[in-house]
Image (tube, helix red, strand yellow):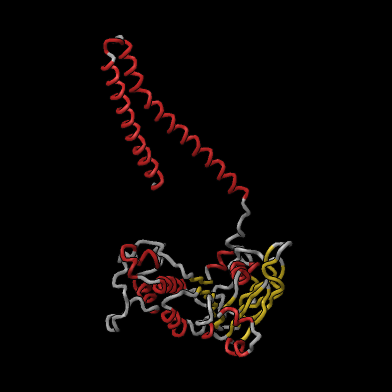
Amino acid sequence: MRPFYFLWTTNRWLFVRVEFIGASLCLFLGLILVYKMEQLDAGLAGIVLTLASSLLEYIYWMMRQSTAVGMHFDAVQHINEYMDMPQEPPGVLDGSRPPAAWPTSAAIQVRDLMIGSTEECILKHVSFTVLPGEKMALVGGGERNAFLLCLFRFLDPLRGFIKVDGVNIAWIGVEDLRSRITFISKNCDFIGDTVRSNLDPFGEYDDYELWQALYRVHLASPEDGLNEGMIYDLDMVIRQNKMMFSTGDKQLLAMARAFLRDAVKLVVIEEASEDHLKIARIITEELMDSTVLLIAHGLDHALEYDRVIVFDEGELVEIGRPMELLKDTNSRLHMFK
């Protein structure tokens, strides 16, 4: 409905300006005809004014019709482009669905993983294991991003596999996979106008469950608790109060949505430049038994994690406890200080 509204308001904007130009043209011609009154016939003057008043109307009609024809041709072109695009894997594969409680421990096993094209590989023969409940920081560039895209199956590997709790993620549907894993970007934004529409866009949960999720991330406080929460009403309009919510608060709201869906066994968090203490507090208090992967943009916060993985030049070059790696003067980890 909104694009249709924009289309008609644009047409009205054009119509007003065309009519103004037409009136100005008629006024200009009328002044000339009055000035040349003695040299022109009255019938010829009437024909000139009639044609001048209708000329821009036809021009306006031609502009609208040509624009409409262009829109229709663009629509056909886009449909053809979408038909030729590679299709995403099925959301659900009947007969190959993970258990209802999967993942239970969220252990990740990566073996001989190769990502990219046959001409150029982004990752080459990468193998490592993330233990259940381990907090691991990922350091690197495009290699780290390619691994995460493969973990969520936006990219398919050329070789190797990723298993979560023994389940090869290539054997299950993408909806089953992505609904059990949570990704929290540092650029989280609101997906609705109110707190309720952000937490529960499909209206699947009651108010009690929504408040409990907010309590867990400390965006709201119980009546008998400390007044540390900023959310006091589920129907609070947050788009009008954007300045109240920092980057970390938006991440916490996304975390509350993950708690609501019970999808916190495996969490991928992109490090934010501010409010890291808020996220670290939730990881310590609420995600103690969860597997957490941190997309680290530096070493300040990566040092707090159990282990760190260092990617460089398409390979996994180091993996281990961050303080032990920093003791080695030849460690690649020093490059990311």
Task: Tell me: residue 57, above or below residue 280.
Answer: above
**Viewer-proximal residue, 160 or 116?**
116
Q: Residue 65's x, y, as percent?
A: 45, 32
Q: Residue 202's x, y, as percent?
A: 41, 62
Q: Residue 204's x, y, as percent?
A: 41, 66
Residue shown at 31% from the left, 18% from the top: 49
Task: Tell me: residue 298, above or below residue 322.
Answer: above
Name the side, left or right, on which 32 lies relative to 145.
Answer: left
Q: Is residue 310 visible?
A: yes
Residue shown at 36% from the left, 19% from the top: 51
* Tally of numbered discs: 0
Q: Is residue 260 visible?
A: no
Q: Residue 167's x, y, as percent?
A: 64, 74
Q: Quadrant of the C terminus?
A: bottom right
Task: Tell me: residue 115, above or below residue 322.
Answer: above
Name the side, left or right, on which 277 lies relative to 41.
Answer: right
Residue 210 location, quadrant: bottom left
Task: Tell me: residue 75, above or below residue 292.
Answer: above
Residue shown at 41% from the left, 74% from the top: 248
